[in-house]
Image (cartoon, coloured by chain):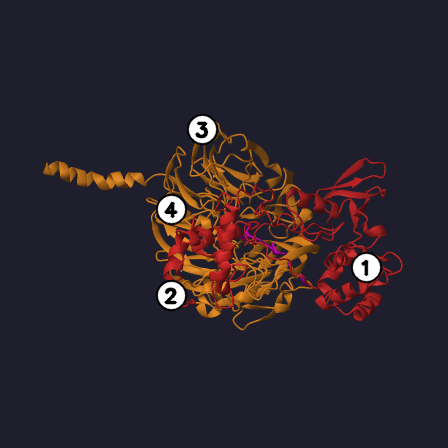
Chain colours: A red, B orange
Amino acid sequence: MRSKMNFIGLGVLFLASVAVQRGAQRGGTAVLPVPGAPTAQAGQRGGAARGGGQGAPTQGFPAQQRPPGDAGLISRGNTLYGIHCRSCHGADLRGGEQGGPNLLRSEVTMNDQSGELIQPVIRDGRRNSGMPSMPPLDLSMDDIRAIAEYIHSVLATARGQGSPPPGPPVALNVLVGDAAAGRAYFEAKCASCHSATGDLKGIGSRFANPAQLQNTWVAGGAGGRGGVTSPVTATVTLPTGQKVDGRVIRSDDFIITLGMPDGTSRSFRRDGDVPKVEIHNPREGHLKLLPGYTDKDIHDVTAYLVTVK
Amino acid sequence: MRILLLLTLAVLPALLAAQSSGGLDPAVLLKPLADNWATYSGDYTGKRFSSLTQINRNTVKNVTLSWVARLNGTAGSPQSIVGGVGSGEYTNVTVKGFVLYFDETLYVTSADHVWALDARDGRLLWHYFWRTRGGTHTGNRGVAMWHNYLFFETPDDYLVSLDARTGKERWHVEIADFDQQYFSTMAPVVVGDHLLVGTGNDLDASGFLQSYDPESGKLQWKFYTVPMNPGDPGLETWPSLDAARHGGGQVWIPGSYDPETKLYIFGTGNPTPGYTGVGRKGDNLFTCSVVALHVDTGKMAWYFQTSVHDTHDWDSTQTPVLIDGIINGRQRKLVSTAERNGYFYTLDRVTGEHIVTAKYGSTSNWAKSVRPNGVVEPDPLKEAIIPGSLVSPVESGVTNWPPPAYSPETGLFYVPEHNGFNMLYLTDPDPRGSMGLGGKSVSGVGSAGDFLTAIDYKTGRVVWRKPISGGGVGAGLLATAGGLLFGGDGSGNLMALDSRDGKPLWHTRIGNASNAPETYLLDGRQQLLIAVGDTLYAFTLY
């Protein structure tokens, strides 16, 4: 239910620089950031800006604030969990193959303070219709407290509203595409503007991982000199016929503001089509391509581009 | 003695009645929107269509600022009253919900705060601050009013009632389990002697709507949006009861109400885990649905699922709009909704019968087909996948919770349209799925544009699209019988547009609106109210 308009759309007429700036204002970290491209998901983690724009600080997650538990007790609880609970509830507490429920989203564990709610379940077992049953376990209250402390220590690693405790890192292979098909696609669709021996030379080694490369090229942020995208510019044609060119600082229905080469800026009032305004967005061609890509095209081209040395 | 007793008995009902008389009579909310703005959408229809006409296509150019009121800095003033169960300190505030206007007074909220302001000049009458015990602070969508009492929800899951005249607390009750990570933002809705209260959660918990007695704060009924017990309806759309009970469907935006059928109609949130649907195969009823409840009992009359087995966090928590219109020559009682997933639906609001399904999000690419009953079938290939899928819209959707508007004069349904694209990666391929909104990563890769979009509710056809600068309309819309449509763009302008074609007629650059525009009548003059962060701006015509 993450609600807020985190995404600052890079409209055909919109400005990458503004997007980046506004994304940053929303106080989040972009996932897999793309240099020179929108930090579109800024503000995701904090859940801060669910409306209107300005965020409120995120206070206290998880909601159940508790002091860190005793390390020795947690360690003992971890061992006891491994012996008595793990086979049903899973090594990561998120439920196991034998049908034990996920303890990280359990009403019992989340409301428990120091074993008082967990203890009756362990002592008496559980037999709910529609749920797998749990046999009673003969454990001392001390052991149950240790297990409870361990469970709470895992719950406390949740990273924010809606974000589960991180599991161990998983190696994922983003490169599933067909490099030869990607090369053919590139030569047919991209080569009129880009070249593997020119502007994209060495692109395969320019990024930390293939996902970053993929995000960047799909966003149209990989071309140009050294991957730096040129700014959005505009030509304003005044009623006198005079033309003014500059970098777009602001553009809405009522005013357009251009940055001049000498560092000053000029603003023009807009009234419908007067003055005439032509926006030149270097990424426009890429933005127009977005609705047309298939995921296979994307994966193939990425598989090809990582080979471009 | 007996005479005394009789006298007492005779006077007692009058005394009791006095408690709940005066102030805002719930019957006022049944009237078409004009003089007051006394419930979330102004009235129960969700249209956000005001019949006020002083500010119109001809006069709007003469609209002028009446007053400005800044809310930061009012904390700790002599008028401040402090309540709450925790130790939370004052933080900067942002108005991200509706402002209630009634009887020359404005009631404004931010998370943990309520203010009463004199509507003539924005002067502070009182301020109430709730000391929080923590939790997720995303915002507050406003108060509800019943006679002289106000009601608001807190992020740490209390429903608090205040005396509207003084700001003094009457009572507070706990409405959801804080330890399960519920957090509460919704503006409660008064319907007769019911106070409807929703809450939110992103961590695999069941969604529900509750009705409270506005006098006593006692629970009247509780409706779960997911199956909670064996045999519950919809359980066949989940792989197990455990999955259903953790299946989400939170109710965090107010619905609309039809007094003739006594149906309260609202949208439910996304299923959980949000992005990894592998552990909840099936349609996942009644998440991402429009649901109609009998308001006196909380029993469901009908539902229509607007996102089947959602795997993109596209809550169906948009404001349903009640429209009376003619379909195929027949007068019908309808409800229309433009959803976060980019689809527009019109239903019969008495029966839930499907009438229109239409795509309005220009680039929405997640659907595979439309079932005969109008339900859109998602394409599993557009879920999060390890090598990444290109998905439009982005997580925040084509539109979001900020309200749309409808004008019976143009027959057009107005909604912000955002056509962003994400690369969506599965990062947790565990066959059990992830939890909450975890298990994925996203990267925005651009947008095909942001628009204000006008839709014909009878067909779902987009009649016009107006490009909106700066990322589009951010905070909701207002339509009026003056032929106007009010909304903010993303470049800091509050605009009045011609409701026929979207042409701008007036604007003022006050900063990006943080709530939707409202209008009401004060001293015989039409007022226009908007919030920008912690600041309220009131405009009028002199």
In this orientation, which residue lies closer to the viewer: B185 or B523? B185
Same chain for the residues under marks 1 and 2 in the image: yes
Q: Look at the image and give the residue range highlighted in magenta.
A: B389-406
Report the residue that reaches farthest toward the top.
B78
- Disc 3 or disc 2, which is closer to the eye? 2
Q: Nearer the viewer, mark 4 or mark 3?
A: 3
Q: Mark 3 and mark 2: span between their CA atoms?
A: 55 Å
Q: Secondary structure at mark 2?
A: loop
Rounded to the nearest angstrom, the CA distance separating label 1 from label 2 is 57 Å
In reply to whether residue B402 is colored magenta, the answer given is: yes
For marks 1 and 2, the one nearer the N-term is: 2
Image x and y of residue B381, in percent: 64, 68
Subunit of label 1 = A
B41 or B223: nearer the eye? B223
Same chain for the residues at labels 4 and 1, yes or no? no
**Foreground: disc 1 or disc 2:** 2
Task: Read off the residue under disc 1.
Answer: A204
Query: Farthest residue toward the bottom?
Result: B372
Point out which mark residue A127 bears: 2
Instruction: Confirm whether the magenta stretch covers residue A42.
Output: no
Please tell me how crowded label 3 is: few (under 14), some (14-19), or many (20+) other residues with Cα within 10 Å. Answer: some
Disc 2 marks a residue whose amino acid type is Arg
**Lateral position of residue B218 relative to residue B239, left or right:** left
